[in-house]
Amino acid sequence: AQKITQTQPGMFVQEKEAVTLDCTYDTSDQSYGLFWYKQPSSGEMIFLIYQGSYDEQNATEGRYSLNFQKARKSANLVISASQLGDSAMYFCAMREGYNTDKLIFGTGTRLQVFP
Amino acid sequence: DTEVTQTPKHLVMGMTNKKSLKCEQHMGHRAMYWYKQKAKKPPELMFVYSYEKLSINESVPSRFSPECPNSSLLNLHLHALQPEDSALYLCASSQAGKWGNTIYFGEGSWLTVV
């Protein structure tokens, strides 16, 4: 079974609008971290935001926020006030438990921002 | 700017060549990683070094040989590669072990095997 599921292969959003990228996950661990990365066409994988399984508040980093719904096992990324430079591939990822160095990626969502 | 530095950014090599990809970080991280990424796919884990020891090898063919000379450096030695090995190779680092430790990536090395 997929551990990280991103059901939106592609999304379009107009500049200055907000957009939500979906991510659901599957784990039996109580301790896990959820991450979002942005990958422009240049290839670099840029860390955006982190949510820990024990964090009660949703994480925010500037224009990025993570809508964490633990019971539904979802960790959606919300980008507010989209900019043309936000056009990129976005990956949701998870790291489980202690003594683990594995980061499990979803299949990604390609976001295109238009003027 | 990324604090994980990869060289070279682009590499073209023949199937009989021997080359190396290099990675360096100065964040004091004790886990370092190599990932391979094909077009339109997520990164796939290849190797993990934890405290300079190889801790994970995801059944990678022996034509890829990792090396961790010290806690800041990670190399990937390439020999007798196939055209299907052409991909983006991403190096990454993090604090070791715990689920909450963020993994930081470099800009990647684009490899083409001809």
Image: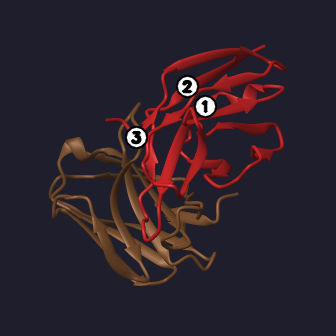
Is residue B106 placed above or below A42 in the rendered structure?
below
For the residues carrying marks 3 and 2, which lies nearer the camera in this image?
A: 3
**Can you identify the residue that label 1 sits on?**
A88
Give x and y (percent) for residue B87.
35, 44
Provide the chain ID for the residue under circle 1. Answer: A
**Can you identify the residue that label 2 sits on?**
A110
Report the residue that reaches farthest toward the front.
A71
Q: Looking at the colours in the rendered structure, which chain would you say is drawn in brown? A: B
Judge from the rendering whether residue A21 lies leftward or rightward of residue A61; answer left or right: left
Label 2's element? Answer: strand
Does residue A31 show up? Answer: yes
Q: Looking at the colours in the rendered structure, which chain would you say is drawn in red? A: A
Q: Quick check: marks 2 and 1 in contact, CB under 8 Å?
A: yes
* Of pointers 3 and 2, the one earlier in the residue sequence: 3
Q: Residue at x 32, y 73 (%)?
A: B55
Label 3's element? Answer: loop
* CA neighbours of label 3 inside 10 A, class few (<14), some (14 to 19), many (20+): few
- The span from disc 2 to disc 1 (Cα, nearest Å) is 6 Å
- The span from disc 3 to disc 2 (Cα, nearest Å) is 19 Å
Say which mark, if any, is on residue A3: 3
Label 1's element? Answer: strand
